[in-house]
Image: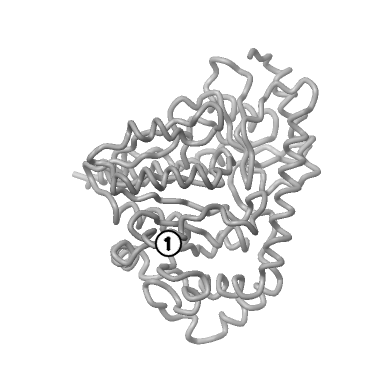
């Protein structure tokens, strides 16, 4: 008799990116394939960083473990009360496993980042879907107040958001902080894309000014997008001592430490690449403007719901057709890969996510033309 895998893990949905990549036609096309599937920068790390990485690779100590919480000099350069992780996904998994277990629940705004849902499902942590407010497109505070109960362990916010691109206001974030604080639950604030806010030099919030922030706030961050290090896997958790001690136990079991060379790369970026990072954020802003302009194309029935940082959330015009069917057709017939809204939670069948960070601004008009092409090929109805 064969062994059986963990039922909770077996029940988790298929990894969405891998699933969608399989929709790319194998036959060659006469035109360029536009891949709007995965949030990766289209450019490599800075040349100076690659030279620093190469130099670090030649040092014998780079092959050794670092402390579980990360290189002391990297932690000191980033913040007090911080642990370094192998990417922000690991940060989320470690934090939520430290905070909650079977029978507990977490408030997760819909649409959500699918890896967050996948981890919580695998750990048998219940999800309370939190709707967005119709007037702002931000998580609904009044709905959150009604959803928090005695088994709630955390409220999760992602800003700038994946998948919608929405950037939440500081006051709105503060209200969720107050809600979490009043109920004795954690506010887990995923700021992976904070370097790509409209004005990244200004603070996204003032939560760290509260002398008691460690009792409520947990911040997650990734160096991957800021310094184009997606394959190196390096992120961070900022939180209180008790939380970080729990995270340390989990990370020690999962990976012992984030890759040493990735931590060296992140440290180099923090020390030397502020200007480079700012230039790349400007490049993303230009792509966002080009995308926004493209959705003003005459005859285009796809509607841009929200956009920012790396993402755009779009309402497709095919009423009654599942989002996955629309996405598969765009890939197979129109040489363009997007993700269906159904990958991001309940009641998302009318939506598609576009990850535009790896698409040059001059391709945005062609993207819009292909959306229009998909309408004429099938017909659409609002």
User: With 185 as the anchor, is 296 left or right in this view?
Assistant: right
Instruction: Give residue 36's quadrant in the image.
Output: top right
Q: Position of residue 165 (x, y in %)?
A: 59, 41
Locate residue 71: give its quadrant: bottom left
Could you tell me which residue is drawn at 41 percent across and 33 percent down?
A: 130
Residue denoted by label 1: 237
The structure residue drawn at horizontal position 48% and vertical position 40%, both measured from the top left corner, is 16
Q: Secondary structure at mark 1?
A: strand
The local crowd at label 1, few if under 14, some if 14 to 19, many if 20 or more residues have their Cα within 10 Å, is: many
Q: With 316 as the anchor, is 89 left or right in this view?
A: left
204 vs 275: above or below: above
Q: Quadrant of the C terminus?
A: top right
Return the residue nearer the eye: 284 or 10: 284
Q: How many marks?
A: 1
Q: Is residue 48 above or below residue 255?
A: below
The residue depicted at 32 percent of the width and 68 percent of the height is: 252
- Image quadrant holding the N terminus, namely top left
In this rendering, position of residue 162 left or right of residue 11: right
Q: Position of residue 254 (x, y in %)?
A: 34, 63
Q: Position of residue 215 (x, y in %)?
A: 33, 57
């Amino acid at each position: 008799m064969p062994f059986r895998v963990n039922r909770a893990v077996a029940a988790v949905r298929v990894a969405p990116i891998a699933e969608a990549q399989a929709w790319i036609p194998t036959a060659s096309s006469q035109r360029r394939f536009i891949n709007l599937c995965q949030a990766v920068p289209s450019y490599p790390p800075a040349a100076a960083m690659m030279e620093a990485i190469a130099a670090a690779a030649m040092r014998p100590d780079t092959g050794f473990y670092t402390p579980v919480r990360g290189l002391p000099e990297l932690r000191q350069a980033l913040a007090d009360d911080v642990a370094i992780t192998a990417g922000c996904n690991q940060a989320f998994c470690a934090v939520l496993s430290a905070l909650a277990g079977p029978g507990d629940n977490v408030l997760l705004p819909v649409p959500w980042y699918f890896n967050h849902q996948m981890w919580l499902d695998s750990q048998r942590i219940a999800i309370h879907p939190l709707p967005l407010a119709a007037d702002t497109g931000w998580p609904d505070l009044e709905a959150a107040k009604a959803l928090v109960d005695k088994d709630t362990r955390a409220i999760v916010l992602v800003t700038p958001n994946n998948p919608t691109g929405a950037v939440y206001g500081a006051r709105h974030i503060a209200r969720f902080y107050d809600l979490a604080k009043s109920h004795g639950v954690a506010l887990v604030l995923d700021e992976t894309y904070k370097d790509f806010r409209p004005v990244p030099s200004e603070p996204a919030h003032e939560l760290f000014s509260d002398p008691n922030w460690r009792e409520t706030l947990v911040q997650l961050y990734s160096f991957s997008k800021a310094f184009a290090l997606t394959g190196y896997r390096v992120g961070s958790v900022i939180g209180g001592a008790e939380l970080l001690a729990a995270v340390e136990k989990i990370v020690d079991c999962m990976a012992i430490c984030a890759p040493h060379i990735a931590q060296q790369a992140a440290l180099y970026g923090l020390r030397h690449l502020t200007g480079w990072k700012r230039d790349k954020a400007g490049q993303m802003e230009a792509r966002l403007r080009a995308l926004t302009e493209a959705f003003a194309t005459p005859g285009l029935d796809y509607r841009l719901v929200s956009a920012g940082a790396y993402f755009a959330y779009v309402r497709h015009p095919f009423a009654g057709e599942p989002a996955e069917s629309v996405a598969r057709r765009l890939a197979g017939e129109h040489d363009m890969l997007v993700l269906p809204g159904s990958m991001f939670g309940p009641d998302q069948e009318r939506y598609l996510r576009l990850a535009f960070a790896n698409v040059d601004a001059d391709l945005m008009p062609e993207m819009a033309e292909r959306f229009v092409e998909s309408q004429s090929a099938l017909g659409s109805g609002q």
